[in-house]
Amino acid sequence: MNMTFKDVMQFYWGYLKTYKIQAVIIIVTIIISTTFGVLAPRYLGRAVEELVNYVTAVFSGQEATLEAFHGILFTLLLFYIFSEIASFINIFLIAAVAGNTTNRMRIKMFKKVERLAIRFFDTSKDGDLLARFTSDMENISNALQQYLIQVLSNVAWIIGIIWMMFRVNVSMALLTMSIAPFAWVITIIIVRKAKKYADLRQDSVGELNAYIDEKISGQKMVITNGIEEETKKGFGIYNKKVRVNSYRGEVYGGLLFPIMQGIGLVNMAMVIFFGAYLTVTGDVGRAAGLGMIVIFVQYSQQFYHPLTEVAAMYSQMQLAFVGARRVNEILVSDDEVEKPDAVELTGIEKNLELKNVEFGYLPDKQILKDLNIEVRKGKVVAIVGPTGSGKTTIMNLINRFYDVDSGEILIDGVDIRKMTLKSLRTHVGIVLQDSILFPGTLRHNIAFGKPDATDEEVMEAAKQAQIHDFIMSLEQGYDTEVSDENNILSTGQKQLVSIARTVLTNPALLILDEATSNVDTVTESYIQKAMDRIMVGRTSFVIAHRLKTILNCNHIIVLVDGQVLEEGNHRQLMEKGGFYSELYYNQFVVD
């Protein structure tokens, strides 16, 4: 998503407009600082003029004093003091505004992430998303704290200097500004190139972060498969993109400063030459001419210095523009859809039904095709089938991680799209194939879905999940600190904690998505016992790969290529001698 300069300014203004009072104070102090700053060269010129007049009078034998000279110097001192005080106020206020703005921006982005549809996360890389919270936000913060005040001050300086130059001498003012159009043309050319590579740099940084995150998370698999060298080569490719784009962006951004500085020096030489010419030819008096040269040398430096400063920090400002684009991409992404008049789901009284459901993650590739499934209250339905048949997709649709393309999913005859997301997901419990533990205690992990659960409720859930005895055998029991990376718990034990977490929420509908596929047969028996206990009297979906875990299910559906191929209980399907029977015997031989 591309953003124009106007779009970027509107993005920042959306946050900064909250601080209107601070903005007024900042603008007033900038005007005060600029006014004293642009007046100073004129008074410095008058000081030189007074000093020349004094020296001339002394050498001519005339009576002269330095009273006027001292008065001007004192005025200059006051100008510089007031200018610095105003600048200090600017820095203090802009730091406060910038800090609060980036804080609000970060909070808003995180809240937005919490509302995004699952599709966003399925199509985004974790490392790239993390980069938007870190490097992009840092670039925005730097721009607001370091560069915003400089840009505002420099613009005010340029306006003030132009005004003062024309008041002093129109010819010298025009000469001082004569090279400015040339400088701006060069700036525009370089800026466009710098913008291109700044965009590419941040995007490639996000890709690099995503690659690093992916490989670090799967480092055990990298080592196990002996692909360290291939991983290094892959890192080199992504890192090279960052290096090349960073180099090109810095080169183009860095060109502006020396070019603008060189133009400023050329302009200053022109001012000195033309001022000397006016003085020598007698168009301007000697004392006035020297004073004018001093004034315009100062104005020449001050006129091109702001342009040079803006040019010098352009590459960093461009990163802030790119950061705004990347942050805004998240903020404008689609939220999960919930109808304004959505109803609350209070439980399952009759059944859950998938009716003529069709769905595909991509428009041109259907996963589920005219699917019809019914699960009556308190019954357990198992779904089996080869990889890619659409088993897990059904779970995604029931939870409204995605919405069906056509057809409908009904609970007690009500389309789940007409229900609030919170009430729907509160009544649907999922045990995934890959268990996840969050940093904290075992108590915290089990109570994750119900933070206000009592200790008794946590223990009862653990008992149902067959993990209570193990937890009590630990030195710190339920207060044992764990995370997803540590080795205190085996894979099976982590899965039992996940089951306890789901049990604690007491869902009306339970979905077990291949919950035993990553464990050995001994651990599988423990998990199976836990699953059997929690499914008693509860409406349940069991998505399974190992058929021996679903032998006692009320109904078994065989899903192939997104369609129901066979259905019935275990005995009925075995008697048919079809796909299920073949799959069962194949697994039995393997086992």
Image (tube, rainbow, N blue to C red):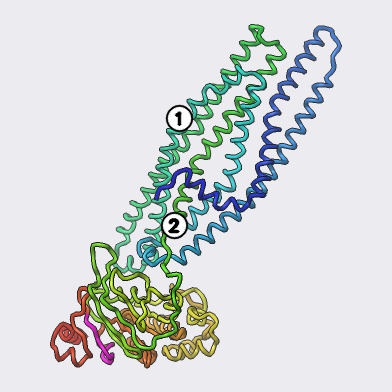
x and y percentages locating residue 442 in the rendered image? 49, 81
Looking at the image, residue 480 sits to the left or right of residue 244; the answer is right
Kindly identify which numbered label has been placed on residue 426: none
Camera-nearest residue between 184 and 499: 184
x and y percentages locating residue 90 in the rendered image? 67, 44
Camera-nearest residue between 443 and 111: 111
- The residue carrying mark 2 is 332
x and y percentages locating residue 93 in the rendered image? 66, 49
Residue at the left extreme?
A: 577
Picture quadrant of residue 508: bottom left
Q: CA distance from mark 1 to mark 2?
A: 35 Å
Would you call the spot at circle 1 few (<14 residues within 10 Å), some (14-19), or many (20 or more)?
some
- The residue carrying mark 1 is 186
Picture quadrant of residue 360: bottom left
1 and 2 marks in contact (CB < 8 Å): no
The magenta stretch is: 550-558
x and y percentages locating residue 444 in the rendered image? 51, 79
Q: Measured along the vertical axis of the image, is residue 578 above or below residue 537?
A: above
Label located before the other in sequence (1 or 2)? 1
Q: Measured along the vertical axis of the image, is residue 470 above or below residue 562?
A: below
As shown in the figure, which amino acid type bears the numbered disc 1? Answer: Ile
Q: Nearer the viewer, mark 1 or mark 2?
A: 2
